[in-house]
Amino acid sequence: MKQYLALALAAISVSACAVVPQTAPAGILETEGDFSVTLERDWSRWPSQINADTTGEFITQDGVLLNRVHLVSIPDEGSLVRPRRGVEMPIYSEGASEFEVIEFVTSSLEMIGYHDVEAADIRPVDLDDQRGLRFALTGVWQNGLRVRGDVATLPHDDQLDVVLFMAPELHYYDALSAEVDGIIASINHGAD
Amino acid sequence: MIRRLMTLGAAAGFAISLSACASTNMEARVVGDRPMDLSTTEASLWYQTDQAEERLRASGRTVEDPALNAFVHGLICEISGPFCADLRLYVVDTPDFNASMAPNGMAVVNTGLLIRAETVDELAFVLGHEFVHFEENHFLERHAAIRNANITSSILGSALAAAGGGAFTSLTSLAAYSGAANFSQDQESEADSKGLDYAVAAGYSATAGAEIWSHFLAELSASDLDAVRNRRGGGILGTHPHIERRIEDLTAQAETLPSPEQDQASYRALIRPHLHTWLADHVVRQDHGATLVLIDRLSEQGTDLGVLLNARGRVLVLRGDEGDTEEALETFQTAATHDDAPADVWRSMAEIHRQAGRHADAAAAFQSYLDRAPDARDRALIESLIIDLTGTSS
């Protein structure tokens, strides 16, 4: 009997380690990075522990294959792609130029299954009273699905804050684009 | 002790005899071949490659350049003769140096091969090599060899363990799988040799085989990455022979075969529309040593220097070693003197000036970039940078 009890306790302990998607309720969302955003409605939140390919967390409305907003603060010499042994990753370096940041994002996406990723409508933008960068993305997912996206990047301290929205071009991008604009505009670092 | 060794030897001999019963030898295929018995392993492998072909078609990774596709497909037909109708070409946009012909007739040619070949002759050799794999059913034979290695390893390991030789089971696995690897190396050597014969029979130069391998070896040797340098081949579990040995074998074979003069210019004209994009795919990989070797070799022809030097400058900027920035600026400045220089050259020069605090030079170079690329996707950003640098709008 003691053996069964010990086994049950062990199983419960192990299951407590499992991380699952959570609800991110409407309102202010403190991201795993060093900034917060404001959500108009409830989203599903995928913490970084269940994100196999990239660092940082996602929020999604319809599942990460249909739309995802990636929220992450990348440290100096850090990567957006989750490091793999023996594989060279695109690395962010503090002080990187706008062009290097764009290449960092596009080449990171190329490494996780997107291809023909191109940036467009590249423009400076003020976010949280700081100079940041916004650009649009187009690309193709590995199954041939055409995708679109929007990116906002903001250097902050020695990190690069990134909000990266990706969705299939057909329907899903347009359905959320305006709402994601609001999320990007709400980036806040609190009192530094 | 002697008795125990005899027992172990008998066990090993028994297992090897059993594994030898499973043949890996398949007959060469005939035109229009397709397995009719759907219960066979062969049919299963065809089905899997059919599925892979469907995924490739839908992936959007194929290069839709009718002239390029028609040319490469025509070359495949020259090499494969009556098998032409069995082969379907896909030019795949990936910088890896590779091509393949699957059992179901899916022929894949990577852009990483097309950019590395300097003549049609070199491409013909590689296609000849892949066609031999297809014609001789090497894919299916390799599958059978690996299956046999699995069986041999299991039986031999169990037999030795039963005979008290459990400590040797990992060695038996090594022996079984190195046998499969040797088998694969033999196939590669056969494909090199026969592939060169096919290319020569179609009228291409016999020296092209050793040449393309020599170029690739130089690239691998210059790589910044251990994993890439290790691809030079060989070793007990390597599936491909060492490239140096392949070059020696192909050079020896070419001595007795015709080697008509090769035409670099016409081949470059074929890939010229893609050169800028394909080079960019290499640059972003950040294997600076290998990419510089590739660019410098392609530059030896003396054409396309605006595009090639632009790529070289970008590699130097990304590498960022001591002196690289200065050399990159000189490289971009030289690139800018060539008619084919992309507008990116001026933006890159502007960036170097900006980072060095030479604001007027940076603003002027950014303006030159916008003059050459009025619809640039980063126009709003560049205009903003010019204002920051000069205090006035462009």
Image (spheres, grey):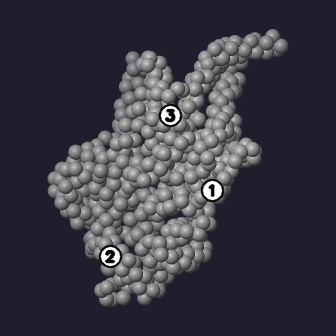
How far is mark 2 from mark 3, CA to CA? Answer: 49 Å
Q: Mark 2, residues whose alpha carbon is within 10 Å: few (<14), some, or many (≥20)? A: few
Q: Chain for mark 2? A: B
Residue A26 visible to the viewer: no
In the rendered structure, which disc, 2 or 1, sits on the residue that comes first in sequence? Answer: 1
The residue indicated by pointer 3 is B83
Q: Which residue is mark 1?
A: B262
* Disc nearest the viewer among 2 and 3: 3
Q: Residue furthest right?
A: B2
Label 2 belongs to which residue?
Answer: B374
Where B258 sits versus B106, above or below? below
Q: Is residue B81 left or right of residue B210?
A: left
Q: Position of residue B385 (x, y in %)?
A: 35, 80
Dividing the picture into quadrants, the one containing residue B327 is: bottom right
Q: Chain of mark 3?
A: B
Specify whether residue A146 is in view.
Answer: yes
- Name the foreground residue: B386 vs A61: B386
The numbered mark, 2 or 3, whose residue comes first in the sequence reads: 3
Q: Quadrant of the N terminus of chain B?
A: top right
Say which amino acid is labelled 2.
Pro
The x and y percentages for residue B176 are 66, 25
Residue at horizontal 21 percent and vertical 58 percent from the top: A177
* B8 versus B370 height, above or below: above
Q: Classify residue B299 by image quadrant.
A: bottom right
